[in-house]
Image (spheres, rainbow, N blue to C red):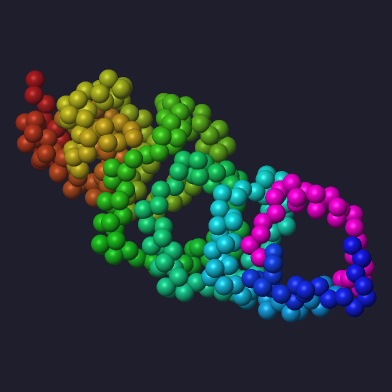
Amino acid sequence: MVFKKGYIPWNKGKFGKENHCFGIHHSEEFRKKLSKINTGKKLSEETKQKLRDNAKINPNYGRRGKHFILSEEHKKHISESHKGHKHTKETIEKMKKSMKGIKHPNMVGQHLSEEHKRKIKLANIGRIVTEKTREKLRRANLGKKESKETKDKISKKLKNRFFSEEHRKNLSLSGKNRPIPIGTLKSMKKRWKKIKGKTWEEIYGEKKAKEMKEKINNLGDKNGNWRGGIAYEPYDKNFNEKFKREIRKRDNQVCMLCGIHREKLYRTLDIHHINYDKLLSISENCISLCSSCHMKTNGNREHWTKFFQSLLAERYNYSYSENLEPILTL
């Protein structure tokens, strides 16, 4: 089609509902045809200048990001048109490469307001992260190491940070009886089977095991609960799987401190030596505890020894001396 010089199209400068093409969507086939027709075509400088001049009439000319003016109706149309749309793997890779190392232009130097943070918090309450998403996040962060600068920032934020008693109780309650994800549970069981009955040298290798022990030994003597490295001392021969099963059976597969049943835990109950003597593995000196309660017994040992001895004496009629030693009845 050839236009005479000075011809002005009837829809020139008309936008939105004024334009006869408003609301019309071309089919995929038609779009492909247009794409083929225009492939390789180059616009003249004169045509480019005309397009620029026409664009200036648009109220959004020169605006970017948050400064772009869109009506609520327009926003809804955009939202609906993008629903269910998925980018191809090739497109995702291109987007990743183009955005790598670039901070979002609209968020540079900006901080979220308290109200904004509160809204994000409320939006995420009750949100369940699927196993698939967790696995994606795990893989994405695999092998990533935080820079020294980032570590220092985290350290400064957490320094002198104290939780209130109420907050601590809430944390404790939220952690109790929490179901362990199936994937995590399986991996933990596999790991446990591999390392069960092995020494640190067998698990980590001699070099790494030595380094780990040195670190613990260097820090240990500064700790109030340090007992000269008795954690490395071996147990006696009686402390085997058969003996542990007998103690758990005696205690009805229940933690004797908090009362949680084995069925609600992701691992078997621990067997704790009441007077902390690893070489005295007898029923009068052992008790079933969950891992959480077992950790509590690392401090204030005299208190826990007296407490558990009085508990077993009341329940199983065991006897103990003034020196907190079990009295065996023949």
Q: How many marks?
A: 0
Spot occupied by residue 108 in the image (x, y as percentages of width and height): 62, 72
Q: Judge whether 209 appears above or below 3 on screen.
A: above
Left or right of 3 on screen, residue 252: left
Instruction: Work out which quarter of the rendered image holds the N terminus and state it.
Output: bottom right
Queried whether the magenta region covers residue 35, the answer comes back as yes
The quarter holding residue 26 reads bottom right
Q: Residue at point 21% right, 30% down?
A: 253
Q: Residue at point 84% right, 50% down?
A: 36
Q: Judge whether 322 appears above or below 17 on screen.
A: above
Spot occupied by residue 237 in the image (x, y as percentages of width and height): 31, 22
The quarter holding residue 265 reads top left
Queried whether the magenta region covers residue 25, the answer comes back as yes
Instruction: Tell me where the magenta segment starts and ends, as one range.
Output: 22-49
Q: Nearer the viewer, residue 298 or 61?
A: 61
Spot occupied by residue 195 in the image (x, y as percentages of width and height): 45, 29
Using the rendered image of the protein, determine whether residue 7 is visible from the camera's viewpoint.
yes
Left or right of 143 on screen, residue 48: right
Left or right of 169 on screen, residue 322: left
Q: Residue at point 14% right, 32% down?
A: 326
The quarter holding residue 247 reads top left
Instruction: Work out which quarter of the rendered image holds the C terminus and state it.
Output: top left
Q: Nearer the viewer, residue 9 or 252?
A: 9
Q: Residue at point 69% right, 64% down?
A: 21
Q: Nearer the viewer, residue 160 or 282?
A: 160
Using the rendered image of the protein, determine whether residue 64 is visible from the camera's viewpoint.
no
Left or right of 101 on screen, residue 71: left
Spot occupied by residue 17 in the image (x, y as percentages of width and height): 64, 71
